[in-house]
Image: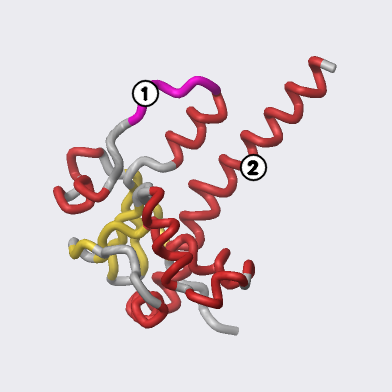
Amino acid sequence: MAARPRVTVHKTPAAAVSAEAEAQSPAPAAAPATPSEELIRAAIQPTVVKAGRHKILMRKPSVLAQFTLTDAMGESSGNEALMRMVRPLIYIGEIDGEAIPTPQNRLQVDALITRLGDEGITAVMTWYLEAIVAPTLAAIESAKHKASVKN
């Protein structure tokens, strides 16, 4: 049985985030209007994830990054299972203090995956599931519950 990669997620104060990653992050929006928006906003604060010897800064990507990734994947962007696997990559702001731009083509996507390795991919996926997917699903369930209570 293979040993599970060691992954640690640490919240990092905004002051500790490097200037490059902060410059890539979108400007703060107005105060959230709903509890769901508050949950999601809290989940996407810059976070440092440790994966083996790497420190990976995770942050909210721009809307353009989402379009760029889809374009970078070319014909493969129609493969929803593959897109679910690569979408978390656009949340990477830095690896070991080096700014990571949004991949512009499939070769750059593959290079980033190779650079992260098994431990890095596991760390990124774990963070994405805990910080993005889980709060989003919780917000959806909360909205469904509120809607059913009103009816």
Which x, y percent locates residue 35?
A: 55, 24
- Residue 30 tag number: 1
Q: Nearer the viewer, residue 136 or 69?
A: 69
Which x, y percent locates residue 63?
A: 40, 49
Vertical comparison of 107 with 79: above or below: below
Q: Secondary structure at mark 1?
A: loop
Residue position marked by numbered label 2 in the rendering: 137
Image label count:
2
Q: Is residue 27 left or right of residue 51?
A: left
First of labels 2, 1 by sequence position: 1
State the separation of the CA atoms marked 2 and 1.
23 Å
Q: Which residues are magenta?
A: 29-34
Query: Extreme left residue here?
Result: 19
Which quadrant holds residue 92?
bottom left
Mark 2: amino acid:
Leu
Which x, y percent locates residue 70?
A: 48, 65
- Residue 118 tag number: none
Q: Residues within 10 Å of mark 2 (few under 14, many from 20)?
A: few
Q: Nearer the viewer, residue 127 or 87?
A: 87
